[in-house]
Image (cartoon, helix red, strand yellow):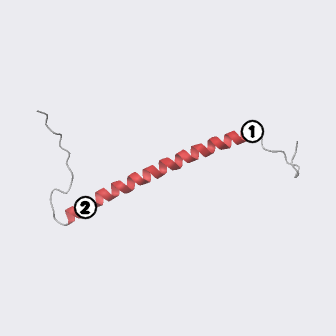
Amino acid sequence: MTDEGGVSPEPPEDERHRNVENAVMLGFFAVLVAAGIWLLGTMADLRKVQDCAAQGRRNCAVVDVPQRTR
């Protein structure tokens, strides 16, 4: 069966293949956005530490010390 233009519709396999490609691209962009957000947060933290050190202050970096158990 053909459309009015004489072109047959796409077979279902091509549509499934396109859906898989779209899902892969969506996953790729989600990872890309997450990496960008992580990078911006890391850069903001680094800038805060550098601004603190540029002012001549001490104890600018956060040091994690485990708590003692009694």
The amino acid type, in three-letter code, at marker 1 is Pro
In the rendered structure, the answer to whether residue 65 lies left or right of residue 15 reads: left
In the rendered structure, the answer to whether residue 19 lies left or right of residue 49 reads: right
Q: Position of residue 41 (x, y in %)?
A: 35, 55
Establish if 18 lies above or below 40.
Answer: above
In the image, which disc is placed on residue 12? 1
Residue 68 found in image quarter: top left
Quadrant for the C terminus in the image: top left
Of residues 1 and 40, which is closer to you in this image?
A: 1
For image coordinates 52% across by 50% down, the residue present is: 29
For image coordinates 15% across by 62% down, the residue present is: 57
Which residue is most to the bottom? 55
Establish if 13 lies above or below 56.
Answer: above
Q: Residues within 10 Å of mark 2 (few under 14, many from 20)?
A: few
Q: Position of residue 42 (x, y in %)?
A: 34, 54
Q: Position of residue 52 (x, y in %)?
A: 21, 62
CA gap between label 1 and label 2 equals 57 Å
Pick whichever of labels 1 and 2 is earlier in the sequence: 1
Which residue is most to the front? 70
- Residue carrying label 2: 50
Which residue is most to the top? 70
For image coordinates 21% across by 65% down, the residue present is: 54
Q: Residues within 10 Å of mark 1 (few under 14, many from 20)?
A: few
Total labels drawn: 2
Which residue is most to the left? 70
Give yes or no for contact between labels 1 and 2 (Cβ–Cβ under 8 Å). no
In the rendered structure, the answer to whether residue 30 lies left or right of residue 64 reads: right
In the image, which disc is placed on residue 33? none
The amino acid type, in three-letter code, at marker 2 is Gln
